[in-house]
Amino acid sequence: MTMKTTKDGIIRIGVLVYPGCLRSGAVMPLDVFNIANTLAGIRPAGSKPVQFEACWVSARGDILQEVDGLYFQAHDIHKQKLDALMVPGIDHRDSSQLDGLLDALAPEQALMESYLRDDGLLISSCSSTSLLARTGKLDGRRATTSWWLSAYFRKNFPQVLLEAEELIVQDGQLVSSGGVTSYIDLSLWLVGHFAGEELRQMTAKILVVDANRNSQAPYVAKAIMQDQGHAVIERARRWLNKRLDQQWAMADLASYCNVSQRTLLRRFQESMKLSPIHYVQQLRVERAKALLETTRLSLEDITTRCGYEDVSSFSKIFKHWAQVTPKDYRRRFGLRF
């Protein structure tokens, strides 16, 4: 883990509270950072001093935010300069509730979009990754969410490179995590990111938390995963998502999925309504869009990072799926190659 420090050694973290957020997700991170601060104070002389300042923030101004009988004194986030913004998960019973709950969080969604104009980390967990995905900022990027929401997420946000078995995924300034209590892992991740691995491990020991877990796979219960797609397709998608910058062969994909190429093509078409090749083309174009929007990489570099060698060929594929050329797409953001 690469440690990032600030000039004054103070790490300012906001925890977004909003109607219907998970209360534990709003409270526990502050406890983790307080423990980290205590341990940082007794580290050996010569260690770089680091202090975490965490507070509750709101997209709805300075407010005493009530969440199911618990009150949070939240500060207007627009008055804060943060190094990281944490967004707790959304309290819900099943995925059929989520669309309506997400609709009600328009102020929080708008806040996420505006926050990402700066360079602070945006940290989503569990179901709040769906709120972030609604902004479109996750298109073409890697992310994770609670494993039992993976089918819902893939259906509603097909342009996101979902890695549902991962516990924590970072893609640039966007960091996401899995199921409900993964906000503890996220808090520890932030401790390590800003203050180093030693303090992260020490904090985890005080919390009696496994600091080395990195996957949701041991917790997955296939029997209750909602709208679970065919296992072959899920396996194929995971394999393809990790190879967007590489050349690959259909024979290798079929072998990995333990089926014939013919069976793979048929099942992929039935489930996704397109072939594996077209699926990868779409994801590569979404990845290219993200790079065009957020970096000053040349078109040649972006082409290579999206698994192509020839700029002209990739430009044609980009125009087919995006209905615009890469250069015209970048000009929308006032950037030039």
Image (spheres, grey):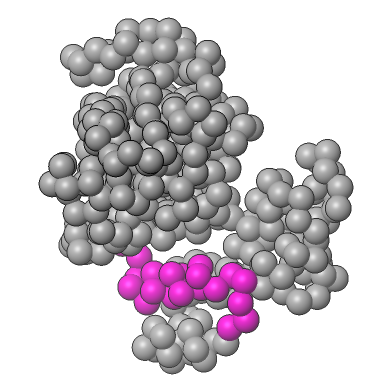
Determine which quarter of the picture holds residue 45.
top left
x, y percentage for residue 274? 57, 70
x, y percentage for residue 66? 27, 13
x, y percentage for residue 109? 50, 29
Q: Is residue 74 shown left or right of residue 325?
A: left
Q: Residue at x 82, y 70 (%)?
A: 311
Q: Residue at x 36, y 20 (%)?
A: 55
Q: Residue at x 67, y 67 (%)?
A: 305
Residue 157 painted magenta: no
Determine if residue 319 is in view. no
Q: Front-most of 236 and 173?
A: 173
Q: Residue at x 23, y 42 (%)?
A: 203
Determine if residue 76 is in view. yes
Q: Front-most of 61 and 31?
A: 31
x, y percentage for residue 241? 51, 68
Q: Front-most of 145 and 95?
A: 145
Q: Is residue 51 above or below residue 245?
A: above
Determine which quarter of the picture holds residue 190.
top left
Q: Is residue 192 above or below residue 297?
A: above
- Identify the magenta region: 227-248
Q: Is residue 283 above or below residue 22?
A: below
Residue 228 painted magenta: yes
Q: Quadrant of the N terminus?
A: bottom left
Q: Front-most of 239 and 83?
A: 83
Check the image and name the residue furthest to the left: 208
Q: Is residue 264 shown left or right of residue 24?
A: right
- How many tags in the picture? 0
